[in-house]
């Protein structure tokens, strides 16, 4: 009885030991298989050149332990192989993507607004701003063409009368004449009338004389040549030959001397009005108002000339100096611009005169201005001498209604263009 009970206990213990030994042998086999799989995986990934830094899914043998224990996870490729505990936990298969415990090889999900639009063209940098091109100097002003206005002058815009020896336009009227004569010559223009006011600004323009001899020989003029917007009238005075030009829209006359054998050329300007309103105006110089002021400047000029030249004569340069200016200050591109006006009404006459060149300086100088002489003899009349024998040049005479400002502005425009230019 006792022996059978002992025999049963022995048999149960043996079975128990055998069962435990079997389980141990099974666990050891599984460990050996897991290590072999790890080694084979390491060799395979190394041969392919892939990184084994990622963590693979658990259960590399494709099965779980019969007792429900998790399979052993693979170690990192560069980590030393070492036995892993049988009961190591496997990362959950349903771990969120992108989490530290997620399946290896999955990339984090990118938000839609952070995704790159591959279809959109690449953004180009804005082109660099280039420096603005340098400003070029304005081209020099050339002589104006014969006709600048698109609208031609209307038919009959001028009248030339051989009987009256006169030229008439809507802007000016003058007469060729005789009267104040010196040795078979006289001033060419006796009248210079504003058609609007009928005021005559000429006491005698373009007078020439020689040897102070008197006679009464009339001026003659030849056939008129008509151009697009101006006329040319050849004029002979006995001591000069010239071309007088009248432009459509110009209240004046352009005079170009071709020959000159007179001793002097002289203009007599006349302006109506009260004595204290009449003024001699000149570019670069203060106005001389009234005959009293004019005679004071004349006397001072003669004294300066005596000191400067040894002659008590009212020379042009000393006249300008006596009025507080200089010849150079009064020059506009080698020209004098001057006039005789009524300051109260603005009416009067303007003139442009080209100074001769000083041979020594090749430019106008004080000596060039000596022959430009201003004599204020009466309240409403002034005499201006210029152009000694041999001088050929071009000058302008024109009426104004805008006072000093118009005298200067029109004079500059004529010099700049070399002729009258319609606006």
Image (tube, rainbow, N blue to C red):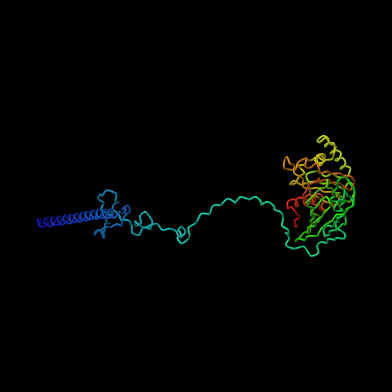
Residue at the bottom extreme, as displayed: 155
Q: Is residue 310 left or right of residue 101?
A: right
Q: Is residue 364 left or right of residue 205?
A: left
User: Residue 357: in sight, yes or no?
Assistant: yes
Work out whether 152 lies above or below 409: below
The residue sitting at 32% across, 52% down in the picture is 53
The residue sitting at 9% across, 56% down in the picture is 3
Work out whether 235 lies above or below 384: below
Q: Quadrant of the N terminus?
A: bottom left
Q: In terms of depth relative to the viewer, which is nearer, 203 or 328? A: 203
Q: Find residue 63 and report its horizontal and vertical position in percent.
A: 26, 60
User: Residue 343: in sight, yes or no?
Assistant: no
Q: In terms of depth relative to the viewer, which is nearer, 262 or 160? A: 262
Work out whether 195 lies above or below 390: below
The residue sitting at 29% across, 57% down in the picture is 58
Q: Is residue 153 left or right of residue 84?
A: right
Q: Quadrant of the C terminus?
A: bottom right
Q: Find residue 297 and report its horizontal and vertical position in percent.
A: 85, 40
Residue 57, quarter of the rendered image: bottom left
Q: Is residue 345 left or right of residue 104?
A: right
Residue 27, quarter of the rendered image: bottom left
Q: Find residue 210 and report its horizontal and vertical position in percent.
A: 85, 46
Q: In terms of depth relative to the viewer, which is nearer, 3 or 180? A: 180
């Amino acid at each position: 009885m006792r022996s059978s009970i002992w025999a049963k206990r022995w048999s149960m213990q043996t079975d128990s030991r055998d069962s435990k030994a079997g389980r141990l042998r099974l666990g050891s086999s599984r460990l050996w298989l897991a290590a072999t799989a790890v080694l084979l995986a390491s060799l395979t990934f190394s041969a392919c050149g892939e990184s084994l830094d990622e963590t693979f899914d658990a259960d590399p043998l494709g099965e779980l332990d019969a007792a429900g224990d998790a399979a052993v996870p693979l170690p990192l490729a560069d980590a030393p192989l070492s036995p892993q505990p049988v009961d190591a936990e496997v990362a959950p298969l349903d771990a969120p993507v992108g989490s530290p415990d997620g399946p290896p090889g999955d990339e984090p999900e990118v938000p839609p607004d952070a995704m790159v639009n591959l279809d959109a063209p690449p953004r180009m940098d804005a082109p660099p701003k280039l420096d603005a091109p340098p400003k070029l100097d304005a081209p020099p002003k050339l002589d104006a063409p014969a006709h600048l206005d698109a609208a031609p002058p209307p038919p009959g815009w001028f009248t030339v009368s051989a009987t009256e020896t006169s030229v008439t336009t809507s802007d000016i009227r003058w007469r060729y004449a005789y009267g104040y004569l010196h040795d078979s010559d006289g001033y060419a223009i006796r009248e210079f009338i504003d058609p609007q006011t009928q005021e005559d600004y000429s006491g005698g323009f373009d007078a020439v004389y020689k040897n102070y001899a008197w006679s009464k020989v009339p001026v003659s003029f030849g056939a008129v040549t008509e151009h697009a917007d101006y006329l040319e009238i050849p004029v002979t005075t006995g001591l000069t030959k010239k071309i007088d030009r009248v432009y459509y829209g110009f209240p004046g006359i352009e005079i170009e001397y071709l020959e000159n054998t007179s001793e002097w050329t002289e203009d007599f300007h006349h302006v109506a009005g009260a004595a204290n309103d009449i003024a001699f105006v000149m570019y670069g110089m203060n106005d001389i108002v009234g005959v009293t002021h004019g005679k004071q400047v004349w006397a001072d000029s003669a004294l300066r000339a005596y000191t400067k030249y040894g002659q008590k004569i009212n020379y042009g340069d000393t006249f300008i100096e006596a009025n507080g200016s200089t010849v150079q200050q009064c020059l506009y591109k080698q020209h004098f611009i001057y006039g005789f006006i009524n300051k109260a009404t603005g009416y009067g006459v303007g003139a442009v005169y080209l100074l001769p060149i000083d041979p020594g300086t090749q430019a106008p100088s004080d000596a060039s201005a000596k022959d430009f002489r201003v004599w204020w003899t009466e309240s409403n009349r002034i005499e201006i001498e210029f152009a000694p024998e041999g001088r050929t040049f071009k000058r302008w005479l024109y009426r104004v209604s805008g006072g000093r400002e118009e005298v200067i502005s029109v004079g500059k425009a004529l010099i700049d263009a070399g002729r009258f230019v319609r606006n």
